[in-house]
Amino acid sequence: MRCPACQYNGTRVLDSRPSHEGRSIRRRRECESCSNRFTTFEMVEEVPLIVVKKDGTRQEFSRDKILRGLIRACEKRPVPLETLEQIVNEVERELRGKGKNEVNSEDVGELVMERLALIDDVAYVRFASVYRQFKDINVFIKELTELMNKG
């Protein structure tokens, strides 16, 4: 590892610990030449997961995009951010566990909605109304009826 201060190509590790929910390792290092201390992160390089949209376009899977949608759906609801991050982690883990490089956006949305329905009904309906793009009130009422019948 090269020192960011003096560019010397020799450092030693002072401390290592898991970071980002065990997805990476945080290392404290010290330069053997100038004694500068700095932090590095080591993580597994994952194969990109591509999401195929309804119109056929493709884009890289974005944890942040899902989290932003969940935060919007849970606005003014008693759902902690940690719970929403857990949903994103579970969805990503399940998608990557399928062993495919490409997934349909419908599959992503359904996985998110399955988990959100277990946590908060109002947030679920908000998310579903945007995700499923309810065309009229009858589709919305049908979704609410199905939700009430499950509960």
Image (cartoon, rainbow, N blue to C red):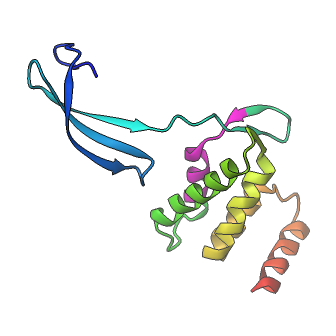
Observer-nearest residue: 81 or 90?
90
Observer-nearest residue: 18 or 89?
18
In this figure, what is the number of numbered marks?
0
Please tell me whether residue 18 is drawn above or below residue 42 in the rendered image.
below
Q: Identify the residue at horizontal 73%, vertical 50% (top origin).
A: 98
Locate residue 142, reporting x and y percent: 88, 74
Locate residue 123, reporting x and y percent: 63, 68
- The answer to whether one can see residue 123 in this image is yes
- The answer to whether one can see residue 120 in this image is no
Quadrant containing the N terminus is top left
Please tell me whether residue 31 is drawn above or below residue 75 in the rendered image.
above
Label the magenta part by its dominant secondary structure: helix
Q: Identify the residue at horizontal 8%, vertical 19% (top origin).
A: 34
Q: Is residue 44 left or right of residue 105?
A: left
The quadrant holding residue 16 is top left
The quadrant holding residue 115 is bottom right
Residue 145 among those drawn in magenta: no
Q: Identify the residue at horizontal 39%, vertical 36% (top origin).
A: 42
Observer-nearest residue: 149 or 3?
3
Locate residue 108, reporting x and y percent: 73, 52
Query: Which residue is situated farthest in the right direction here?
Result: 138
Q: Which residues are magenta?
A: 59-71
